[in-house]
Image (tube, rainbow, N blue to C red):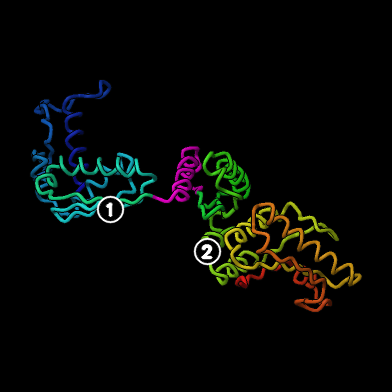
């Protein structure tokens, strides 16, 4: 119905413009046409090749309830309330959706109520307007607000998702360089925000490339505070599949290229700190056994210290180096170093 009204209005407007020579650069229409005023509330439809006027009331009188609801919801969307949902049975209107705060909830309800009461169709039949609009929790409201700010800054595909004290940046970047730049923009936006800056401990990169697989931090998006040990283990497993935390040779210093992977692991640990998280470090079998054991312990402790720096509860973490005692493949294998040198996260329910 909305598209029909638009098309009728466009036809009428076009006829008026041509007939009255609205543009001085264009010649006037052929003789036989004359300019007439179009009264408010009057539209035109084509009948047998001629424009015939019809009143708005005549058009709306043919509307079914869902068409009326759709038309009013579109108006609400243009007014800045695209999240409001309207159910209309011809007598009772039910408003629902998630508002950012209580003021927005009230404003949206009053705007919808006014539209319904003054509408030429709904206003004549309106019996009640029921307000079932809910207010977002503060964490969700902050994430929505930041996403809207990023869209206004020219990044409509970049979104902020928050769970507890962890913020994740999501969206599909057009290129690797754009992904890097946008991550820095999003991280700065979150960290500099007065509300989010105090609430969030870490900003995780969950961005992906167009037509690419899920980003490093994607497993975080399925987690909330209070996730089960199984859910936390699945998140660590998904994140570490085909990935590994890289260290400097024979050292426990994490390479810069693994920083975002370590950030993502930290985010999972923050959401899963109600359980015990064992950080296992394994290395290849070359060299002295005592040195290998010591190196693996220092690497596991380095990861634990990173978790602690971002606020993970100390009693949730266990750092354990296994040296070369638990290889996945024989040392003679061509990919031994790639598979045997690894960091593994094991999640267990916390014992009382």
Q: Secondary structure at mark 1?
A: loop
The residue segment tinted magenta is 136-159
Decide if residue 213 is in sight here: no
Q: Residue shown at 20%/41% (left/top)? A: 115
Please, which residue is most extreme toward the right here?
Answer: 288
Q: Residue, x 72% and y 53% (percent of image)?
A: 257
Q: How many residues crowd mark 2 within 10 Å: few (<14), some (14–19), many (20+)?
A: some
Query: Is residue 193 or residue 257 the one in the foreground?
Result: 193
- Label 2, on which residue? 226
Which quadrant of the figure has residue 106?
top left
| Left or right of 225, for residue 67 | left
Q: How many numbered marks are there?
A: 2
How much space separates mark 1 and mark 2, taking CA atoms? 28 Å
In this picture, residue 288 sits left or right of residue 147: right
Q: Position of residue 14 (x, y in %)?
A: 20, 33
Helix, strand or loop status at disc 2: loop
Q: Is residue 44 left or right of residue 244?
A: left
Residue drawn at x 57%, y 39% as measured from the top left: 192
What is the residue that sits farthest to the front in this orientation?
352
Q: Which residue is mark 1?
A: 132
């Amino acid at each position: 119905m909305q598209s029909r009204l638009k098309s009728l209005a466009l036809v009428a407007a076009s006829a008026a413009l041509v007939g009255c020579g609205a543009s001085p650069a264009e010649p006037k229409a052929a003789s036989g046409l004359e300019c007439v005023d179009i009264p408010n509330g009057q539209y035109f439809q084509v009948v047998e090749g001629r424009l015939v006027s019809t009143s708005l009331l005549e058009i709306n009188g043919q509307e079914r309830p869902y068409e009326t609801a759709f038309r009013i919801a579109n108006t609400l969307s243009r007014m800045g309330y695209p999240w409001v949902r309207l159910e209309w049975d011809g007598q009772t209107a039910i408003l629902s959706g998630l508002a950012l705060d209580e003021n927005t909830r009230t404003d949206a309800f009053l705007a919808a109520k006014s539209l319904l009461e003054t509408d030429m169709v709904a206003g004549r039949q309106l019996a009640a307007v029921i307000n079932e609009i809910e207010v977002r929790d503060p964490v969700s409201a902050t994430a929505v607000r930041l996403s809207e700010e990023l869209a206004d800054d020219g990044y409509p595909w970049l979104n902020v998702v928050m769970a507890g004290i962890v913020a994740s940046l999501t969206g599909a970047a057009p290129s690797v360089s754009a992904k890097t730049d946008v991550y820095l923009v999003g991280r700065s936006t979150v960290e500099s925000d007065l509300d989010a800056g105090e609430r969030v401990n870490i900003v995780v990169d969950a961005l992906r490339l167009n037509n690419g697989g899920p980003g490093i931090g994607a497993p975080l998006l399925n987690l909330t505070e209070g996730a089960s040990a199984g859910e936390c283990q699945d998140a660590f497993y998904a994140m570490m599949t085909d990935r590994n935390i890289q260290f400097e040779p024979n050292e426990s210093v994490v390479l810069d290229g693994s920083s975002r992977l370590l950030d993502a692991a930290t985010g999972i640990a923050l959401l899963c700190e109600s359980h015990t998280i064992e950080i296992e470090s394994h290395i290849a079998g070359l060299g002295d056994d005592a040195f290998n054991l010591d190196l693996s312990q220092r690497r596991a402790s380095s990861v634990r210290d990173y978790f602690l720096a971002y606020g993970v509860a100390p009693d949730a973490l266990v750092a354990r180096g296994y040296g070369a005692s638990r290889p996945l493949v024989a040392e003679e294998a061509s990919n031994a170093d790639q598979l045997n040198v690894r960091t593994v996260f094991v999640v267990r329910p916390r014992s009382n």
